Image (cartoon, grey):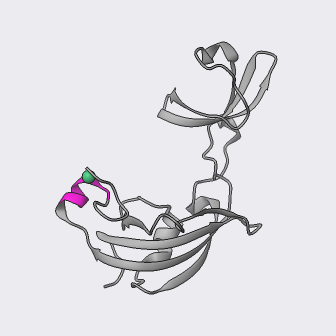
Amino acid sequence: MQVSAQKVVHIHYTLTSEEGEVIDSSEGHGPLAYIHGHGNIIPGLENALLGKMAGDKIKVTIPPEEAYGPRDENLIQTVPIDAFHGVDEILPGMQFHTETPNGVELVTVIDVQDGYVSLDGNHPMSGLTLNFDVEVTDVRDATEEELDHGHVHGEGGHHH
Ligand code: ZN
Protein backbone atom coordinates (compact mmCIF):
# COMPACT_ATOMS: atom_id res chain seq x y z
CA MET A 1 0.00 0.00 0.00
CA GLN A 2 1.33 3.41 -0.97
CA VAL A 3 1.32 6.58 1.10
CA SER A 4 -1.54 8.84 0.02
CA ALA A 5 -4.25 11.01 1.56
CA GLN A 6 -6.24 9.40 4.42
CA LYS A 7 -3.60 6.71 5.06
CA VAL A 8 -2.09 6.18 8.48
CA VAL A 9 1.67 6.16 8.01
CA HIS A 10 4.23 4.95 10.55
CA ILE A 11 7.74 6.32 10.17
CA HIS A 12 11.05 6.11 11.93
CA TYR A 13 12.92 9.36 11.50
CA THR A 14 16.03 11.24 12.42
CA LEU A 15 15.98 15.01 12.07
CA THR A 16 19.29 16.79 11.73
CA SER A 17 20.25 20.43 11.27
CA GLU A 18 22.24 21.75 8.33
CA GLU A 19 25.32 21.33 10.52
CA GLY A 20 24.51 17.64 11.02
CA GLU A 21 23.42 17.96 14.64
CA VAL A 22 20.60 15.59 15.64
CA ILE A 23 17.56 17.68 16.66
CA ASP A 24 14.98 14.94 17.08
CA SER A 25 14.54 11.23 16.45
CA SER A 26 11.95 8.50 16.85
CA GLU A 27 14.65 6.20 18.22
CA GLY A 28 13.77 4.89 21.65
CA HIS A 29 10.08 5.75 21.48
CA GLY A 30 8.78 3.79 18.52
CA PRO A 31 7.68 5.00 15.10
CA LEU A 32 5.70 8.21 14.68
CA ALA A 33 2.20 7.66 13.29
CA TYR A 34 0.37 10.38 11.34
CA ILE A 35 -2.56 10.71 8.95
CA HIS A 36 -1.35 11.70 5.50
CA GLY A 37 -2.90 14.85 4.03
CA HIS A 38 -4.11 16.26 7.35
CA GLY A 39 -1.26 18.65 8.13
CA ASN A 40 -0.11 16.43 11.03
CA ILE A 41 3.51 16.81 9.88
CA ILE A 42 5.38 19.57 8.02
CA PRO A 43 4.43 19.99 4.33
CA GLY A 44 7.91 19.22 2.95
CA LEU A 45 8.02 15.85 4.68
CA GLU A 46 4.46 14.99 3.71
CA ASN A 47 5.28 15.75 0.04
CA ALA A 48 8.43 13.63 0.18
CA LEU A 49 6.53 10.63 1.58
CA LEU A 50 3.72 10.65 -0.98
CA GLY A 51 3.73 7.38 -2.96
CA LYS A 52 6.24 5.64 -0.68
CA MET A 53 5.64 2.15 0.76
CA ALA A 54 6.52 0.23 3.93
CA GLY A 55 10.25 -0.49 3.83
CA ASP A 56 11.14 2.58 1.75
CA LYS A 57 13.88 4.81 3.09
CA ILE A 58 14.28 8.42 2.07
CA LYS A 59 16.62 11.30 2.79
CA VAL A 60 15.17 14.74 2.23
CA THR A 61 16.34 18.32 2.80
CA ILE A 62 13.47 20.67 3.58
CA PRO A 63 13.78 24.48 3.37
CA PRO A 64 12.10 26.63 6.08
CA GLU A 65 9.24 27.54 3.72
CA GLU A 66 8.16 23.86 3.68
CA ALA A 67 9.02 23.25 7.32
CA TYR A 68 8.27 25.65 10.20
CA GLY A 69 8.37 28.84 8.12
CA PRO A 70 10.87 31.68 7.89
CA ARG A 71 11.73 33.65 11.00
CA ASP A 72 9.69 36.83 11.53
CA GLU A 73 11.50 39.47 13.58
CA ASN A 74 8.13 41.17 14.23
CA LEU A 75 7.31 38.24 16.52
CA ILE A 76 9.92 39.41 19.00
CA GLN A 77 8.39 41.57 21.73
CA THR A 78 9.52 43.07 25.00
CA VAL A 79 7.24 43.05 28.03
CA PRO A 80 7.67 44.21 31.65
CA ILE A 81 8.79 41.39 33.93
CA ASP A 82 5.71 42.17 36.08
CA ALA A 83 3.65 40.40 33.43
CA PHE A 84 5.08 37.14 34.76
CA HIS A 85 3.59 37.30 38.22
CA GLY A 86 3.70 33.91 39.89
CA VAL A 87 6.91 32.85 38.17
CA ASP A 88 9.89 32.91 40.54
CA GLU A 89 12.65 33.39 38.03
CA ILE A 90 12.61 34.17 34.29
CA LEU A 91 15.57 32.80 32.37
CA PRO A 92 16.49 32.76 28.66
CA GLY A 93 15.29 29.54 27.04
CA MET A 94 12.14 29.26 29.17
CA GLN A 95 8.93 28.81 27.17
CA PHE A 96 5.44 30.07 27.95
CA HIS A 97 2.03 29.85 26.36
CA THR A 98 0.59 33.30 25.85
CA GLU A 99 -2.59 34.87 24.50
CA THR A 100 -2.00 36.67 21.21
CA PRO A 101 -4.36 38.12 18.56
CA ASN A 102 -3.81 34.80 16.71
CA GLY A 103 -4.78 32.64 19.67
CA VAL A 104 -2.57 30.88 22.21
CA GLU A 105 1.04 30.71 21.06
CA LEU A 106 4.28 29.40 22.44
CA VAL A 107 6.92 32.05 23.14
CA THR A 108 10.54 31.60 24.13
CA VAL A 109 12.39 33.95 26.50
CA ILE A 110 15.48 35.24 24.69
CA ASP A 111 16.66 37.97 27.06
CA VAL A 112 15.97 39.41 30.52
CA GLN A 113 17.25 42.92 31.30
CA ASP A 114 16.39 45.86 33.56
CA GLY A 115 12.93 44.58 34.45
CA TYR A 116 12.00 43.69 30.89
CA VAL A 117 11.73 40.32 29.17
CA SER A 118 12.29 39.79 25.42
CA LEU A 119 10.06 37.09 24.00
CA ASP A 120 10.35 35.33 20.65
CA GLY A 121 7.07 34.07 19.19
CA ASN A 122 8.74 32.24 16.31
CA HIS A 123 8.59 28.45 16.29
CA PRO A 124 11.90 27.18 17.72
CA MET A 125 12.62 25.52 14.36
CA SER A 126 11.54 28.44 12.17
CA GLY A 127 14.17 29.61 9.70
CA LEU A 128 15.92 26.26 9.76
CA THR A 129 16.62 23.96 6.83
CA LEU A 130 15.89 20.46 8.08
CA ASN A 131 17.38 17.14 6.99
CA PHE A 132 15.18 14.10 7.50
CA ASP A 133 16.26 10.48 7.32
CA VAL A 134 13.04 8.52 7.20
CA GLU A 135 12.03 4.87 7.00
CA VAL A 136 8.40 4.03 6.33
CA THR A 137 7.49 1.09 8.58
CA ASP A 138 3.76 0.75 7.95
CA VAL A 139 0.97 2.16 5.76
CA ARG A 140 -2.71 1.40 6.38
CA ASP A 141 -6.13 2.94 5.82
CA ALA A 142 -7.28 5.38 8.49
CA THR A 143 -10.48 4.46 10.33
CA GLU A 144 -13.54 6.71 10.16
CA GLU A 145 -12.97 7.66 13.77
CA GLU A 146 -9.35 8.64 13.13
CA LEU A 147 -10.37 10.80 10.16
CA ASP A 148 -13.06 12.35 12.31
CA HIS A 149 -10.60 13.20 15.09
CA GLY A 150 -7.78 14.16 12.71
CA HIS A 151 -5.21 11.99 14.50
CA VAL A 152 -4.07 8.39 14.75
CA HIS A 153 -5.38 6.02 17.41
CA GLY A 154 -3.48 3.05 18.81
CA GLU A 155 0.20 2.37 18.31
CA GLY A 156 2.23 5.54 17.83
CA GLY A 157 -0.84 7.74 18.12
CA HIS A 158 -3.29 9.20 20.62
CA HIS A 159 -5.12 7.17 23.23
CA HIS A 160 -8.50 7.75 24.75
ZN1 ZN B 1 -9.13 10.63 18.81
- 108 vs 134, left or right, is right
Q: Position of residue 92 (x, y in %)?
A: 73, 34
Q: Position of residue 37 (x, y in %)?
A: 36, 65
Residue under the point 20% across and 66% down = 143
The residue nearer to you, when weighing 68 against 83, is 83
Q: From what the image shows, is residue 72 above or below residue 62?
A: above
- 127 vs 159, left or right, is right
**Which residue occupies the extreme front position in the image?**
28
Residue under the point 45% across and 73% down = 11
Q: Is residue 150 magenta?
A: yes
**Which residue occupies the extreme left position in the image?**
144
Residue under the point 24% across and 59% down = 146
Main structural element of the magenta stretch: helix, strand or loop? helix
Q: Which residues are magenta?
A: 145-151
Q: From what the image shows, is residue 108 above or below residue 12?
A: above
Q: From what the image shows, is residue 57 above or below residue 28?
A: below
The residue nearer to you, when weighing 76 against 125, is 125
Q: From what the image shows, is residue 110 above or below residue 154?
A: above
Note whether residue 82 is visible: yes
Q: Position of residue 100 (x, y in %)?
A: 52, 28
Question: What number of labels is visible?
Answer: 0
**Which residue occupies the extreme right position in the image?**
114
